[in-house]
């Protein structure tokens, strides 16, 4: 009887997972790419991250927030204090209450967090056909194989196979779960003009904005890599010291 119950539970769970997988649909694995921040000694490509911020600002920010970033964090990407102040001043944020008990608008300052494109989630859904654009602050860490996934998703839009139905209002992307996504292709060639003269191809913009989003999700990655290297070096030296002491202490013991 107990074996029968276990078998029934296993069959139920298996069927449930199968139905969930069928409902979610499958997606193609994201191709692996070479990233400057990969590996134990990886660092962020500041030029790519700055270009990626430009792509976010001019393309992605119309729908997606990065609510955990403040404008002053951009100094870590190499922007000067004056540049950060100028970037922040382009936006108005709600502050207050003032002496009359009323909220008011003022230009943003470096200490303010990035302004969200919508006042709340309901407004975001209403403007996007019921779909809620995710916040991008941690998206690179929230998705498995984050950097490769983001690049593949942003550059992977294409025409669907003849036998694959895509409902109106959705778009075919083999790297998205179910291969149907509500977001229209966000990147088009030369959608931005890079100040350093880099050609703004779809692949280049996807690479740059992925670098920026990876930095946004893990801004202390370089510090962690540096600390890890120092710890390993310390342990190697300590091991050598312990070995030398052991040889000295036991030198006269036969």
Image (cartoon, rainbow, N blue to C red):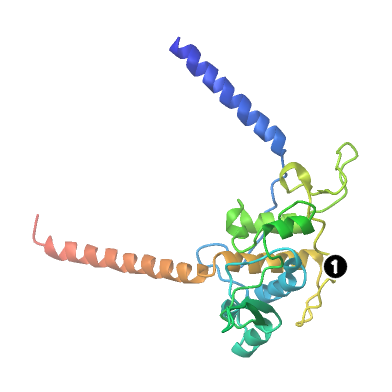
- Residue 142: in sight, yes or no? yes
The residue furthest front is: 100
Taking depth in this image into account, of 234 and 75 the one nearest to the observer is 75
- Judging by the rendered image, the residue that carries numbered circle 1 is 189
Q: Position of residue 41 (x, y in %)?
A: 51, 67
Q: Quadrant of the C terminus?
A: bottom left
Number of on-image labels: 1
Up/down of 70 relative to 143, above or below:
below
Taking depth in this image into account, of 203 and 187 the one nearest to the observer is 187
The residue furthest top is: 1
Q: Residue at x 59, y 74 (%)?
A: 113
Up/down of 92 relative to 235, above or below:
below
* Residue 93 occupies quadrant: bottom right
Q: Residue at x 67, y 54 (%)?
A: 149
Q: Is residue 122 left or right of residue 180?
A: left
Circle 1 sits in a helix, a strand or a loop, which is it?
A: loop
Q: Position of residue 137 (x, y in %)?
A: 61, 64
Up/down of 7 relative to 218, above or below:
above
Q: Position of residue 25 (x, y in %)?
A: 72, 38
Q: Is residue 182 left or right of residue 226?
A: right
């Amino acid at each position: 009887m107990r074996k029968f119950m276990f078998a029934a539970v296993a069959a139920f769970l298996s069927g449930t997972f199968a139905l969930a997988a069928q409902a979610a649909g499958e997606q193609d694995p994201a191709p692996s790419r070479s990233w400057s921040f990969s590996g134990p000694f990886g660092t962020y490509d500041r030029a790519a991250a700055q270009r990626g911020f430009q792509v976010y600002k001019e393309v992605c920010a119309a729908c997606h927030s990065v609510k955990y970033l403040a404008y002053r964090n951009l100094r870590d990407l190499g922007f000067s204090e004056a540049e950060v102040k100028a970037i922040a001043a382009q936006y108005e944020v709600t502050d207050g209450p003032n002496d009359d008990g009323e909220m008011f608008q003022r230009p943003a300052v470096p200490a303010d967090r990035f302004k969200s494109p919508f006042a709340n989630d309901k407004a975001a859904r209403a403007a996007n056909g019921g779909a809620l654009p995710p916040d991008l602050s941690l998206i690179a860490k929230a998705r498995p194989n984050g950097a490769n996934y983001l690049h593949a998703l942003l550059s992977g839009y294409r025409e669907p196979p003849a036998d694959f139905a895509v409902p109106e209002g959705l778009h075919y992307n083999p790297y998205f779960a179910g291969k149907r996504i509500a977001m229209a292709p966000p990147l088009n060639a030369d959608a931005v003009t890079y100040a350093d003269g880099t050609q703004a191809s779809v692949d280049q913009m996807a690479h740059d904005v992925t670098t920026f989003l990876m930095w946004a999700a893990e801004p202390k990655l370089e510090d962690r890599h540096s600390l890890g290297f120092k710890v390993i070096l310390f342990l190697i030296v300590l091991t050598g010291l312990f070995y030398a002491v052991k040889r000295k202490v036991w030198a006269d013991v036969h």
